[in-house]
Image (tube, rainbow, N blue to C red):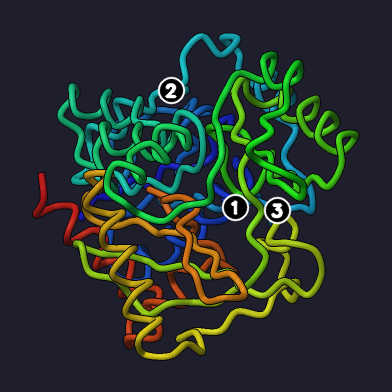
Amino acid sequence: MKIVVLAGGISTERDVSLSSGTKIYHALKSLGHKTLLLDVYLGYEGDSEHIFDKEKNWAEGISSISHTAPNIPAVKALRKDGGKSFFGPNVISICQQADIVFLALHGEDGENGKLQAAFDLLGIRYTGTDYLSSALSMDKGLAKDIFALHHIPTPSGICAPIEDLKKQRPQSVPFPAVVKVCSGGSSVGVYIVRSEEDYQNALSEAEKLDNKVIVEQFIEGREFSVGVIEGKALPIIEIAPLSGFYDYKNKYQAGSTVETCPAQLSQEKSEEMQHIAEQVFAALRLKKYARMDFMMDQNGAIYCLEANTLPGMTPTSLMPQEAQAIGKSYEELCQWIVDISLKMP
């Protein structure tokens, strides 16, 4: 099978995407597929005819994830055409040659439905959910509204333009609170604030990434994640950072977080959380696969934080660990995702 693994891009999660893409690329190659790894933004400058027959290590030179978010202006400067399109040279033509495109993109235009809509119009098959559910999930404010309509427990809060929130902090959300950008990921643009000074500083930092933020209730307790494939929840994984919260560094630097799968929960609590994850999957009209993030407070109340439509597939990512708990290797998980994506519209 001819497969393009599409990664990179220009979101704050670029490095994470390249790490996911590299691992997926090697996994699919080991399964015998004609596979290439392509940066959606930088593209491929060479001759793309018969590209799947080229003897080339497409992952060569890709570095591991650093402690900080990538320098996107420096990436944009690499494009000879000035970056007039999100798609780099030859990306579309190469993807049209593939049987399927494995989306290893994270954040912004990779997960907000725009790319999925473009591929639908061009007749390009791809992994992951469709454009509508991608858009619903990426906008965390809209997703929280949908949670409320479906009685899905989520931290109380408000989504509003940063300029408005600078003038008037929502009194309905006392300190400590969480400030997070409306359309972000990998915990970039997420701040725990405990004072008015923290709050204003968080808004100033978030403004560099988005023009809207969510200010919501801070849930103190245990953190979990639940993958869902074809509407059915996988085993739950618990995430316990050694210090701080589950931020960018703790997500992707090996040894920063203790992860336990299956999570040590009662059968009743496990089933409750998995059921909520499946409810979220249905409410957001998700297809194929996704991952939901949760907090459980000290009284055992469960809150869904958000849905991830293209979950990380890096060496430290959660969904591969959940799949492993049901006996699926990383390679088998990748093949499973390809198979369900080919059979579903």
**Number of other residues with Cα within 10 Å of mark 2, as a class: few under 14, some 14 to 19, many 20 or more:** some
Tell me whether circle 1 and circle 2 mark residues in contact (CB < 8 Å): no
Q: Nearer the viewer, mark 1 or mark 2?
A: 2
State yes or no: discs 1 and 3 in contact (Cβ < 8 Å): no
Q: Looking at numbered disc 1 in the image, what kind of residue is underneath it? A: Glu
What percent of the width, then of the height, locates residue 236? 43, 77
**In the picture provided, is 14 more to the left or to the right than 208?**
left
Quadrant including the N terminus: bottom left
Element under disc 3: helix
Q: Residue at x 25, y 29 (%)?
A: 119
Locate the C terminus and report the quarter of the image it occupies.
Answer: top left
Mark pair 1, 2: CA separation: 21 Å
Q: Nearer the viewer, residue 30 or 100?
A: 100
Sooner in the amino-acid sequence: mark 1 or mark 2: 1
- Asked whether the beta carbons under mark 3 and mark 2 sit within 8 Å of each other, the answer is no
Residue occupied by mark 3: 248
Percent coordinates x, y for residue 260 in the rendering: 56, 84
The tag on residue 60 is 1
Instruction: Please state which amino acid type lies under the numbered disc 3.
Output: Tyr
Find disc 2 in the rendering and name its residue: 87
| Depth check, front residue: 166 or 299 | 299
